[in-house]
């Protein structure tokens, strides 16, 4: 297969983990005779510094013309601590999602057997947890009308029926391919937008009679994820709730550094880790590259290249079993492996197979 991949390393640890992601894609391409072309483009604080725009038009064009985007992370503390900043790195990520119409963000939450003890939750609670959070990505408060002055500020949580229908369709279809259990997460006891979600979901249930659909308030879902994460198979929710719940989900896997995601919709799909740019770790070679590498696995799988995806997953499992791990998931007394050592080990493993 011929694949043109836009590479957006972004900020903080982004460039380091991306390097490993690209190396793994290259190793897989060599093995399976795929022709891969990488086109690098600017985004985030890096792009603001260089061209004054967190998602420049040139980057948009590169993404539009690619088959897939590999994205790492954006964000820089110099903007976080400045409430009056006119332009922020995160706007670049949001602009990319909006301009590419990436309304469906697929965030799998899984456990790795050898890392179960790394979760702050009890082993018996997280063991076997395996669900997908489908987060709506181009609507809700992130994009609704906003206002801010010194005395008043608001963000509008607006959803239209077509926006709700299309994301629920994705969720029902995922449920059909999995254990046929869908949980619609909302706050319908308080929010009008949630009541629309619930109404539309109830109407759509009839088209998916094999799927068991249940409805859960987001506060309750946040708790259920901690006391019984194995309850969930596919969960679907709006943009803001999905953002919050998927960070919580990382506590089930044991590290933010393990969660990949795919954002799909109307144009080029984007594959990106769930974690952020972790600026404090930038350049220290300590960030976990696995979320980026697993995002590359999701990319191959998206193109129907299942074997490629599962080989990457096998290599990741092998690295964990061999205790070739970055510090946050290393066993006590285990050797210290950096971002590049973990990536290199995985590449070597793939080449040996
Ligand atoms: C995420 C991130 C982003 C979001 C930020 C960086 C804008 O937290 O992808 O989850 O809130 O969507
Ligand atoms: Mn987030």
Image (spheres, rainbow, N blue to C red):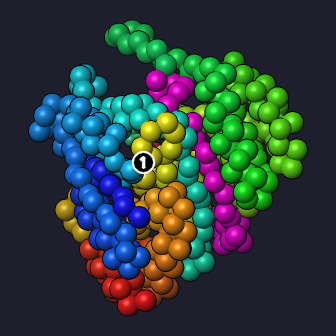
- Residue drawn at (36%, 61%) of the image: 2
Determine if the C-beta at disc 1 is less than 8 A from ligand 1.
no
Q: Is residue 176 visible?
A: yes
Q: Is residue 342 left or right of residue 201?
A: left
Above or below for 205 versus 344 = above
Is 125 part of what is drawn in magenta? yes
Q: Nearer the viewer, residue 286 or 266?
A: 266
Q: Nearer the viewer, residue 10 or 5?
A: 5
Q: For numbered disc 1, what is the local secondary structure?
A: strand
Q: Is residue 165 left or right of residue 231?
A: left
- Residue drawn at (47%, 27%) of the image: 142
Q: Nearer the viewer, residue 222 or 139?
A: 139
Q: Which residue is mark 1?
A: 270
Residue 149 location, quadrant = top left
The percent position of residue 233, horizontal first and vertical second, equals 72, 55
Q: Quadrant for the C terminus, please.
A: bottom left
Above or below for 251 versus 45 = below
The percent position of residue 254, horizontal first and vertical second, equals 53, 66
Is 204 part of what is drawn in magenta? no
All told, the count of numbered labels is 1
State which image quarter holds ligand 1: top left
- Residue drawn at (50%, 58%) of the image: 303
**The magenta segment:** 118-143
Above or below for 176 versus 135 = below
The percent position of residue 246, horizontal first and vertical second, equals 55, 49
The percent position of residue 278, horizontal first and vertical second, equals 31, 53
Q: Is residue 324 visible?
A: no
- Residue drawn at (82%, 31%) of the image: 202
């Amino acid at each position: 297969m011929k694949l043109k991949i836009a590479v957006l390393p972004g900020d903080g640890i982004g460039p380091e983990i991306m390097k490993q992601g690209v190396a793994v894609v290259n190793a897989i391409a060599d093995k399976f005779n795929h022709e891969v072309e990488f086109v690098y483009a600017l985004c985030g604080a890096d792009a603001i510094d260089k061209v004054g725009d967190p998602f420049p038009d040139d980057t948009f064009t590169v993404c539009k013309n690619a088959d897939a985007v590999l994205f790492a992370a954006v964000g820089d503390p110099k903007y976080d601590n400045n409430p009056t900043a006119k332009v922020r790195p995160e706007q670049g990520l949001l602009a990319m999602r909006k301009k590419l119409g990436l309304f469906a963000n697929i965030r799998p939450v899984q456990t790795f057997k050898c890392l179960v003890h790394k979760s702050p939750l009890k082993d018996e609670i997280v063991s076997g947890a395996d669900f997908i959070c489908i987060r709506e990505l181009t609507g809700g408060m992130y994009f609704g009308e906003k206002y801010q002055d010194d005395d008043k500020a608001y963000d509008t949580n607006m959803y239209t029926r077509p926006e709700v229908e299309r994301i629920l369709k994705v969720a029902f279809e995922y449920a059909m391919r999995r254990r046929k259990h869908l949980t619609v997460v909302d706050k319908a006891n308080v929010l009008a937008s949630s009541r629309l979600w619930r109404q539309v979901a109830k109407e759509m249930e009839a088209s998916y009679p094999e799927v068991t659909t249940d409805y859960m308030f987001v506060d309750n879902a946040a708790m259920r994820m901690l006391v019984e994460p194995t309850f969930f198979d596919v969960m679907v929710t709006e943009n803001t709730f999905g953002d919050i719940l998927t960070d919580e989900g990382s506590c089930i896997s044991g590290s933010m550094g393990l969660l990949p995601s795919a954002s799909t919709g109307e144009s080029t799909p984007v594959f990106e880790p769930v974690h952020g740019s972790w600026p404090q770790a930038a350049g220290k070679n300590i960030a976990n590259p696995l979320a980026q590498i697993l995002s590359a696995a999701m990319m191959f799988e998206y193109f129907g290249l299942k074997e490629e995806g599962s080989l990457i997953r096998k290599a990741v499992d092998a690295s964990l079993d061999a205790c070739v791990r970055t510090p946050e998931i290393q066993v006590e007394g285990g050797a210290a492996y950096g971002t590049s050592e973990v990536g290199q080990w995985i590449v070597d493993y793939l080449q040996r197979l």
